[in-house]
Amino acid sequence: MDWLWQVEAAAVARRERSVASPAIRLALRELKARMSPEQVVEALLSRQPDRTGRKGRPQR
């Protein structure tokens, strides 16, 4: 997120409109060109912290 905010700040400095959504679309196109959906899932799952066993919000 910090990097995306830096991209947005660079656009604001140039008096450009919001570029967050186009930047995300560009990143996804680049990711699609480099990795298969299976590779993306594997990369995401390998970077997740260990779960504590608790899911969701506590119930009232």
Image (cartoon, rainbow, N blue to C red):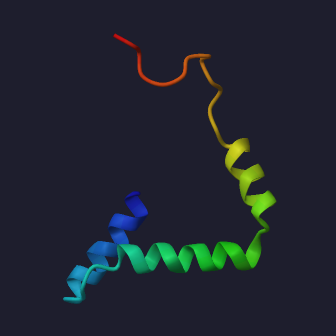
Relative depth, front residue between 31 and 54: 54
Q: Quadrant of residue 27?
A: bottom right
- Along the horizontal axis of the image, is 24 left or right of 32? left
Which residue is located at x 77 percent, y 50 percent? 42
Q: Is residue 56 above or below residue 12?
A: above
The location of residue 55, given as percent across then percent down, is: 54, 22
Q: Quadrant of residue 33?
A: bottom right
- Along the horizontal axis of the image, is 10 left or right of 29? left
Q: Quadrant of residue 13?
A: bottom left
- Along the horizontal axis of the image, is 34 left or right of 49? right
Q: Is residue 27 above or below residue 1?
A: below
Which residue is located at x 27 percent, y 79 percent? 18
For the N terminus, which image quadrant? Answer: bottom left
Q: What is the residue that sits farthest to the top in this orientation?
A: 60
Which residue is located at x 64 percent, y 78 percent? 30
- Along the horizontal axis of the image, is 45 left or right of 14? right
Relative depth, front residue between 34 and 2: 34
Q: Is residue 29 above or below residue 53?
A: below
Relative depth, front residue between 59 and 10: 59
Q: What is the residue that sits farthest to the front in this orientation?
A: 60
For the C terminus, which image quadrant? Answer: top left
The location of residue 40, given as percent across then percent down, is: 72, 59
Which residue is located at x 77 percent, y 69 percent? 35
The location of residue 7, given as percent across then percent down, is: 37, 74
Relative depth, front residue between 26 and 14: 26
What is the tally of numbered marks visible in this picture?
0
